[in-house]
Image: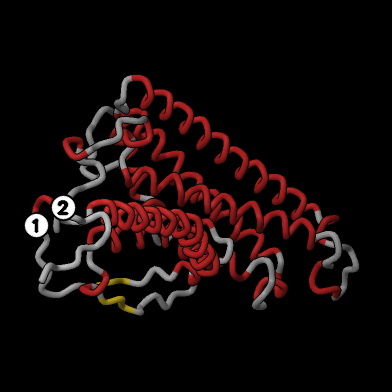
Amino acid sequence: MSEELAPGNVDGGPDWGRRIVWGVGLLVVIVVAVLIASATVPRWWAHRIGDQVDGSITQGTLLGLFYGFVFTLVPIADCQIVDDWHVIGLRGTSSNDYEVSDLFVPEEYTTWRDSVPDRRERGPLYNIPMLTLYGVGFSGVALGIAGSCLGAFMQLAQTKTSGGGVGSTAVLRDNAVIQSRVARACGRLESARAFLLQMLREIWTASAGSGALSLEQRARLRIAITGAMEAARKVVDFTYRAAGTTAIFEGSPFERRFRDLHTLLAQGQAHLSNFESAGQALFGIEPAQRL
């Protein structure tokens, strides 16, 4: 009794036509799924990150660095987040620690951002040391906080009276001491910002040209970075104190910025020892502390 064969398969061999059709169909489904995922998943993830950072550049930067490191180099299942970021300022960054146990990382999976042999991108940005870039970011945040504090104080000074209205009905803007201090704060802030921008332009030009930064350039940039953070501290401290009791209440334009700025100053980028290292470099001495 002969075996009945399916149409198109008269010799009993594989039905290649049907397989090709199924293969093409499966490929189309995969391509469509990838296109849909590429259009929706990044947007979904961006919204999730956006909810976490809540409009904060600092929080977004730190979360980006954290997620990029952990999810790229360490399997998330092997990582334990340590909820220890209980601080007075920059709370929104959620800069918790993480720890792993009994995790072996092969040498080929290790690197350092400033390792020249491991570098794949030769652009000017990657000629600038990582810690220097951190300093640039921190100093920008510090100047932004200080500028916001000064602006808020100048607005407050239009209506707030000296001494809470006891004995004097003059508003703060008419006080000669306040006028002088505001002018000096404005000058201090703008000078720090101008010097920082000047050095960033110079560093970028050198990095794009020769690809190397001289010892003096690194020293001057470090002075600009730490100097900007120190200038920001002086401005924020002035506005916080001059605002009086207005500044101490939660939700005021001053209390959170004061806490954030002083938390920022705990970073190594703001340490006054940076000036010592920069001074050594200006004398042509290679400092032990990296600039």
**Mark 2: which secondary structure?**
loop
Quadrant for the N terminus, please.
bottom left
Q: Residue at x 60, y 43 (%)?
A: 188
**Residue 194, position as x, y percentages in the image:** 57, 35
The amino acid at mark 1 is Pro
Q: With 253 as the anchor, is 174 left or right in this view?
A: right
Quadrant for the C terminus, please.
top left
Q: Residue at x 19, y 72 (%)?
A: 100
Q: Quadrant of residue 61?
A: bottom left
The numbered disc on residue 47 is: none
- Tell me if label 1 and label 2 are in contact, CB under 8 Å: yes
Dot 1 corresponds to which residue? 106
**Residue 88, position as x, y percentages in the image:** 48, 74
Q: With 222 as the anchor, is 179 left or right in this view?
A: right
Q: Residues within 10 Å of mark 1 (few under 14, many from 20)?
A: few
Viewer-proximal residue, 1 or 175? 1
Q: Residues within 10 Å of mark 2 (few under 14, many from 20)?
A: few
Viewer-proximal residue, 37 or 270? 37
**Mark 1: which secondary structure?**
loop
The numbered disc on residue 110 is: 2
